[in-house]
Image (cartoon, grey):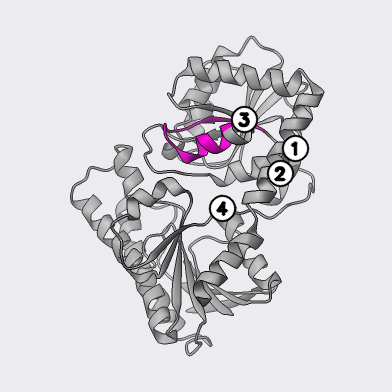
């Protein structure tokens, strides 16, 4: 099949979404399909730019800037984005291309008009991959009231849902947000991650204050949605445990605040590094022992973060502080790949963190067993091969 994939993140960006879409794109090609990835790109000197990304055709279309700007300007620019992309697509060599299927990735929620136009022109099916149920999670967390702005974003989200013939959600628990939709098919599309080799890492844990310790690692975005302040509280509780350390790697709206908080408390068991290239992540995890998953407890949607997949792939059990009822909790506990705190209590988090340390540091056989379970779970559920076959089957049906 010749498939169009619309997204707002892709390499060289380093976000988990960019990594996921890189892996998905390569798997489409590996399975013999032709894939064109359409990306909004600000600052292009021309209306369009075509690149080859290891056999994947990437069409960058000039569009307004939507990253690292204030919320009002971002909202306006995201609303305009699909129309700018469509306008510049019509100037490109692919203007008359017809597709066998259209796939798009949320976030962003604003691609509906572009996906709908491609779908109608090509008379094909459209598959929406939903990884972010916005604006629901923002309203749940109190970042947005359920007023005018919420109703605007909800209208945009509902429109993109109406365009889709099929919607792939992360977990069964998210079906509740789509239970009233009769115009499309809802199915669980698990997250995915390609097995990545250890190519080394620019961060050497042995050269930091964490050398020789059992290291809890968090690699990824540090923002409001993660609710990570409790992790600094945990580190403070364990500051006298010279055998335990905490490593935070990444960027985000809360990164600097967390760094300054740890410094203000004089925590010598915490080390921060800026974001690294995704190819370095396996090399980073090879130096660590336990991965951290953090989601603000006010979330009501279900989320399986990309970093959870990368921990499983690396054989790292997880310490998870997440919202109560999240489907991820049952997965972690039933597969015995970590411990979960769902009450946002530092007491609970401390207790289960020490249980994990005892498991991975106190007994080599136990450590090997939990590591093996993590890798088995990764191979069983989170394969891009399975994801692509599921998407193609849905588009072809």
Say which residue appears at 68% left-offset and 55% top-offset: 194
* Mark found first going from the N terminus, 3 or 4: 4
Residue 31 percent coordinates (x, y): 68, 72
Q: Residue at label 4?
A: 191
Local crowd at mark 4 within 10 Å, few (<14), some, or many (≥20)?
many
Cα distance between the residues tagged 1 and 4: 20 Å
Which quarter of the figure is the N terminus placed in? Answer: bottom right
Does the magenta run of residues contain 318? Answer: yes
* Mark found first going from the N terminus, 1 or 3: 3
Q: Residue at label 2?
A: 376
**Which secondary structure, mark 3?**
strand
Q: Is disc 1 in contact with disc 2, using a CB cutoff of under 8 Å?
A: yes
Q: Residue at label 3?
A: 338
Q: Which residue is more in the foreground, 255 or 380?
A: 380
**Which secondary structure, mark 4?**
loop
Res. 74 visible in picture: yes
């Amino acid at each position: 099949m010749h498939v169009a994939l619309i997204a707002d993140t892709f390499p060289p960006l380093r976000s988990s979404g960019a990594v996921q879409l890189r892996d998905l794109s390569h798997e489409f090609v590996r399975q013999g399909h032709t894939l064109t990835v359409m990306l909004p790109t600000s600052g292009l000197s021309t209306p369009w730019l075509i690149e080859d990304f290891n056999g994947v055709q990437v069409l960058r279309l000039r569009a307004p800037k939507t990253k690292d700007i204030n919320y009002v300007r971002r909202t306006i620019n995201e609303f305009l984005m699909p129309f700018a992309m469509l306008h510049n697509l019509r100037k490109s060599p692919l203007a008359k291309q017809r597709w066998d299927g259209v796939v798009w990735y949320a976030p962003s929620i604003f691609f509906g008009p572009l996906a709908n136009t491609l779908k109608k022109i090509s008379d094909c099916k459209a598959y929406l991959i939903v990884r972010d149920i916005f604006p629901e999670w923002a309203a749940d967390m109190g970042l947005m009231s359920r007023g005018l702005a919420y109703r605007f974003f909800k209208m945009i989200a509902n429109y993109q849902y109406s365009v889709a013939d099929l919607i792939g959600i992360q977990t069964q628990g998210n079906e509740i947000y789509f239970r009233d939709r009769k115009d499309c098919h809802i199915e669980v599309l698990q997250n995915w991650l390609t097995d990545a080799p250890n190519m080394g890492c620019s961060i050497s844990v042995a050269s930091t204050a964490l050398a020789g310790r059992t290291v809890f690692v968090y690699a990824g975005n540090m923002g409001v949605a993660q609710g990570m302040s409790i992790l600094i509280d945990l580190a403070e509780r364990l500051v006298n445990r010279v055998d335990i350390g905490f490593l935070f790697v990444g960027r985000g709206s809360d990164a600097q605040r967390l760094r300054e908080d740890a410094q203000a408390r004089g925590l010598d068991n915490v080390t921060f590094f800026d974001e690294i290239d995704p190819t370095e992540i396996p090399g980073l995890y090879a130096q660590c022992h336990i991965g951290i998953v953090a989601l603000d407890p006010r979330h009501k949607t279900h989320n399986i973060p990309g970093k959870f997949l990368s921990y499983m792939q690396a054989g790292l059990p997880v310490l998870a502080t997440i919202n109560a009822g999240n489907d991820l909790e049952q997965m972690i506990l039933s597969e015995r790949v970590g411990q979960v705190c769902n009450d946002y209590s530092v007491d609970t988090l401390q207790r289960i963190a020490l249980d994990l340390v005892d498991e991975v540091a106190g007994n080599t056989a136990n450590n090997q067993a939990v590591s093996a379970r993590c890798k088995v779970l990764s191979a069983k559920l989170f394969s891009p091969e399975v994801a692509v076959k599921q998407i193609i089957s849905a588009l072809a049906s």
